[in-house]
Image (cartoon, rainbow, N blue to C red):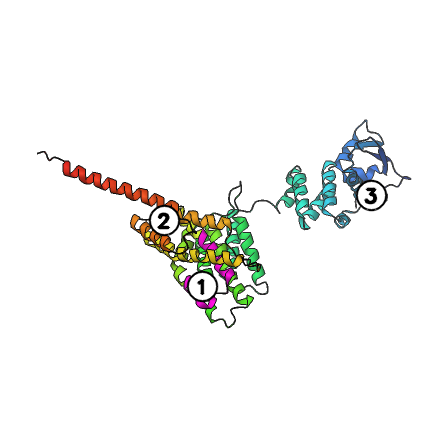
Amino acid sequence: MDKALQTKPCRFGDRKNSDVVICLKNREGTPKRFYSHSLVLINRSKYFANRLSHPSSSDCINIHCSEVNYDHHVNVLKLLYLPADSILDSFDSVKSALGILQVAVAFQCEEIARCCIEYLEAVPWEDKEEELILQAVSKLGPIAMPILARIQPVDLAATKNVFVSAVRVATSISGPCPPFGNELKTSAQEQVEFMLGEDEDAPLVTADDEVKSVLRMGLLQIYSTFEKELSALLLEPDLVSDRAEEKILHSLSDLEWMCNILGKMDLMKDFVSNWAESSSNVLGVVEDKKLDSFMWGLKIKLIEVTAKVLEAVGYGNVILPTPIRVSLLKTWLPYIRKMKPLLDSKGSEGTGFPYKMSEDLCQSIEGAMVTLVLALPSNDQADILADWMGAEQVRYPDLSEAFEVWCFRTKSAKRRLVEGLDGAGNATVSL
């Protein structure tokens, strides 16, 4: 405490030796008198020092405040009487400290303001409190920098390091993370997706070579895990148990998550290429007779992931050679055509069967297949359409639009060919 205060002890509200009255007035003008001491006010507040040093100053200082910050004004007056090393311990909430800070800055109470900032910078904030802090401290200037440092934008290098580390955890590149296990992995996946979320601002992470390399490593890791677990599925002693399906579904969900991430980083071609390459092996396991009556969750999830692949290829977002596009269609079209009526049939039995292809999923697959067929060479289109019409289930997917376009194109091509031949036969040769 200041030497002058030590020689003349003062207590807030002590009327006996008070020489200044602070009169707080709210919006209604109702005054509340606080007996104070000029010695304390001058030493702890530049605002009061200036007011009391003015030649026309009186022993009554009127201050107008609202009902909202009335208590904060009172608290500041009380804190003026506390030793500097006791101010920090007097705060009990973010809301109170923030209100006191605003009044302390207005009254130019440097010690109190510094303690408020030290407190607010160190304690946790709730979401609503953070918004209030941002609104308040943004008007305080450089004094609030320690608080703003907690929520200021991070430089790109630091953001990238966090993102890369999160991808490693999310894809298990660095192995499992005991004792957190899947909880940390799931959290990392959620935050990676959040960091890449589309909004009006610039993306937090750009897909440079390092980021792409880590994402590709993560994709290979997840694919490897999925293929191993899928291959081991038929060796499971109890295929009926939920545990067997949950394990492979968890791995496939990781793969679906990676599909969503790569689509945002212009790396969807890596995912599609891997999916196309492994499709025959995947269906070789799933269509095994052992799984005829089991693993419906796995089967529907495979269709959902395949829908994303078909959309990417069908609408030209991923460019693949013709043989791969043909193979992708000829591999998945028969399976989806078989599964749709089977799932519908089981769902209509009234047994609470939860697995079905939603209307949006059906439309997505159908639209992608139509565009995919129409982008193939005519002969490949003919093979696929002939196979589609020759099947028992022609109802889904409905490729009639592709069939109509193929018929029109084929007839037009024939006409052009005939016209070209006629033109060549009637041409005269001039020397």
Do residues under tags 3 and 1 come within 8 Å of each other at their CB atoms? no
Q: Which residue is mark 2?
A: 373
Q: Main secondary structure of the magenta part?
A: helix
- Work out which quarter of the rendered image holds the C terminus and state it: top left
User: Looking at the picture, does residue 58 appear above or below residue 388?
Assistant: above
User: Looking at the picture, does residue 413 appear above or below residue 330?
Assistant: above
N-terminal of the pair, mark 2 or mark 1, is 1
State the residue at coordinates (24%, 40%): 416
Return the mark for residue 286: 1
N-terminal of the pair, mark 3 or mark 1, is 3
Q: Nearer the viewer, residue 43 or 247?
A: 247
Q: Which residue is mark 3?
A: 5
- Nearer the observer: mark 3 or 2; the answer is 2
Examine the image and state in which quarter residue 228 appears.
bottom left
N-terminal of the pair, mark 3 or mark 2, is 3
Q: Nearer the viewer, residue 377 or 170?
A: 377
Q: Which residues are magenta?
A: 282-307
The answer to if 293 sits in the magenta stretch is: yes
x, y percent for residue 335: 42, 58
State the residue at coordinates (16%, 38%): 424
